[in-house]
Amino acid sequence: MSRRDTTESPMSKFLITSALPYVNGVKHLGNLAGSLLPADIHARFRRQTGHDVLFLCGTDEHGTPVELAAHAAGVPVADYCARQHAVQADIYRRFGLSFDHFSRTSGEANRRLTQEIFRCLDAAGFIEERTILQAYSPTDRRFLPDRYVVGTCPYCGHPNARGDQCESCTALLDPEDLRSPRSAISGATDVEFRATRHLFFRLSAFDGRLRDWLATRRDWPPLVRSIARKWLDEGLRDRCITRDLEWGVPVPKAGFEDKVFYVWFDAPIGYIAAAIEWSEAPSRDWRDWWQSGEDVSYVQFLAKDNVPFHAVSFPATLLGSGLPFRLVDTIKGFNWLTFGGGKFSTSAARGIFTDTALALLPADTWRWWLAANAPETADTDFTVTRFVDGVNKDLADIFGNLVNRCLAFANARFDGTVPEAGDTGPLEHQLVRSLDTHLARLRRHHESLALRKAADEVRAIWRLANAYLAEAAPWSAIRNDTGRAATIVNTAINLVRVSALVAWPFIPSSAEKVLCSLGEAADLVAWPQRGRSTLSAIPAGRRIAVPPLLFPKIAVADLQHCPSGWNQPDG
């Protein structure tokens, strides 16, 4: 659908990627809040303001968690991945995520490209064969790749750190770093370390090039810069990029045919592969986005535990390949959305999951609260009370009330048509000035990826519209001055339009319902113009309708049939 703001001249293009969700089960709200939803909001804003956008994502289908999940489900890994990809794609569609392409890292395009990049790295001398000690479980009678090993983190003491990274402190680990290691398959503690040959990517060779490159990314959020700097300052370690698994991208090197690539080697390459798949349609060329064109800005959205791979490892991989791929311009990293003080977790089945959320309430309800409370500068703790209070206050009492009051009055007193506006007065003149200020702030917040501030500004515009309606009081004016009441209602209807337009990136389904009730084309959601013209965009005489109640109020009691974790006391 077209989202072009035709009042503006052609602008730069935006390549937007969200961290690839693992295919090992339905994702929780933390995944949505920490990458998928913010990326969608930004993609919608950029389309709305006239930019060409390519928004890519997909399921990450390799690695230990996928094999473990398939094993637990008792199905072949390929079948499990296909089924879970379809489930996730459907959920994200129902959440209104506007991907231009939703890919799979197990696809042929990613296999070919991963192997091509590896060959380039190998030819350039950035791949080394090394004999290492790898975890082996006599109980399981197999080598254990890093994520098949869990234990106590040597840095923070987290008892369930994985053999590649501690999800608590984000430290990168090797399995032998763990204290009290055990098998993630059987729980066996008889883990020993045996010699085996693997391939390493010489990440340490890129220290200088990465430092120079990161120095040019001065506008990155502090969270992202600090994590990237920490990695560099602690010294880059060469990374093992092969695994003793059956499922994955095969290694195209003699003597290593029985191994596959480490998931964090091939997964980021999946962003490029997704564009290659997208360009299979006519008149599309992925190279226009990934290789050529100075007018492309590349923005990544991801949670803080993914920052090292996207800010250090993946750029080094692309640099070392010598291929002309675009490096990321901006990384927007997020802290955790927590649940009752602890982390959401797919593997531990802890938290609120996206399928359950959609069964309980409309997608826009979740979208708004998660955006308005995005964990940008610190973790955000989800509680039922905070959620219910926030949704009722913002959506039911402010936005929903504005739409209902204004359109119901117009329907009752002006026969469901937009009345002709007469001369405007000081109240409208001040309204235009205030609205222009809010719109300018909102645009700046979107452009700087300040999600919570953008949501705050949308709320401020809704409040401004409600305040105008309350002060102008058309229900009083109509008693003595029908012309003045008509001007107020005309202005208020246009305010409802503006309120829906600025809401659209956040709550697209609800915004489109409002726009349709105003006779606006829901497939042409343009950014509001500034000045008086934005409050006269809907012509007099147009038929309008009162939409059904947008946001019925919810109560904590309405959620009592949720998983037990929802019912724990919260304030």
Image (cartoon, grey):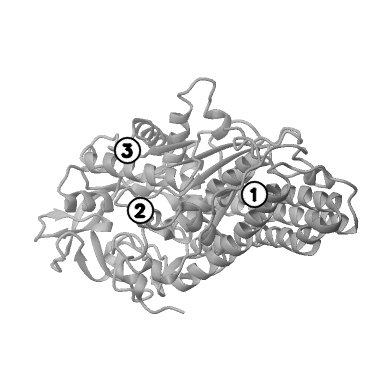
**Mark 2, other Cα within 10 Å: few <14 / some 14–19 / many ≥20:** some
Residue under label 3: 106
| Labelled disc at residue 500 | 1
Residue drawn at (13%, 67%) of the image: 190
Q: Amino acid at mark 2?
A: Asp
Query: In the image shown, does 365 or 35 lie closer to the viewer?
Result: 365
Position above or below: 311 against 558: above
Q: Is residue 170 left or right of residue 534?
A: left
Residue 300 coordinates in the image, percent (x, y): 53, 48
| Labelled disc at residue 142 | none
Local secondary structure at mark 1: helix
Q: Which label's residue is closer to the chain start, 2 or 1?
A: 2
Residue 180 visible in the picture: yes
Q: Amino acid at mark 3?
A: Ser
Query: In the image shown, does 544 or 364 lie closer to the viewer?
Result: 544
Q: Is residue 337 left or right of residue 377?
A: left
Q: Amino acid at mark 1?
A: Ala
Residue 482 coordinates in the image, percent (x, y): 83, 51
Residue under label 2: 355
